[in-house]
Image (cartoon, helix red, strand yellow):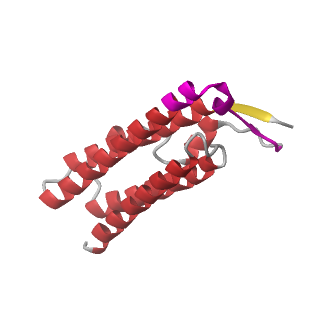
Amino acid sequence: MVVEFNAFEIFEIAEKIERNGAKFYRRAAELFDDSNTHKMFLQLAEWEKAHEQFFAGMRKDLFVQGPKLRTFETKNDVVFDAQSMAGLAVFGNRMDPAVELTGKESITDILKCAIEKEKDTIVFYTGLKDFVSAQAGKDKIDDIIKEEMHHVRILKESLELR
């Protein structure tokens, strides 16, 4: 069975994941007066915003490059559902991060949660690579994965200081 799907949907989901990640980090920054912690979360929010813009640019580039690069085929019996796949990424289709953080969490709780969210995002983007051609920017997704791994390192280092 050949299943076709539209890359626009995938990149829209990636944008949403990044947008939710930025919201999560901005909300986390609001919860702490400690200058270093506050700055770290704001920096993470800015990086996530840049990733959102990156995926929006990829989506725009696909439009310009034509329909051949916008639709992909998968030759297996699994129906690819981009929305379900995004649900696997914790920053994806879950609760609004601004609501998720109540203010009762400790910095340790938030750091652990953020690490898990980043790891899940890495898994999503690793899967996403299988559906993006080289012409559509597959190698650029590797760059985003590396940046997300860098976020994990920053969060882990901060957690180790606690």
Q: Position of residue 44 (x, y in %)?
A: 30, 51
The C terminus appears in which quarter of the rendering? bottom left
Question: Foreground residue, 63 or 102?
Answer: 63
Query: At 60% from the left edge and 41% from the top edge, which residue is drawn?
Result: 135
Q: Position of residue 120 (x, y in %)?
A: 51, 54
Q: Position of residue 124 (x, y in %)?
A: 56, 50
Question: Foreground residue, 3 or 90?
Answer: 3
Query: At 33% from the left edge and 40% from the top edge, which residue is drawn?
Result: 23
Residue 94 left/right relative to 30 = right
Instruction: Read off the magenta span.
Output: 60-76
Residue 9: tell me if it is visible: yes
Residue 96: tell me if it is visible: no
Residue projecting furthest to the right: 1
The N terminus appears in which quarter of the rendering? top right
**In the picture, residue 131 is in which quadrant?**
top right
Q: Is residue 75 magenta?
A: yes
Query: At 57% from the left edge and 30% from the top edge, which residue is drawn?
Result: 8
Residue 101 left/right relative to 14 = left
Query: At 78% from the left edge and 34% from the top edge, which residue is drawn?
Result: 3
Question: Foreground residue, 105 or 28?
Answer: 28
**In the picture, residue 35 is in which quadrant?**
bottom left
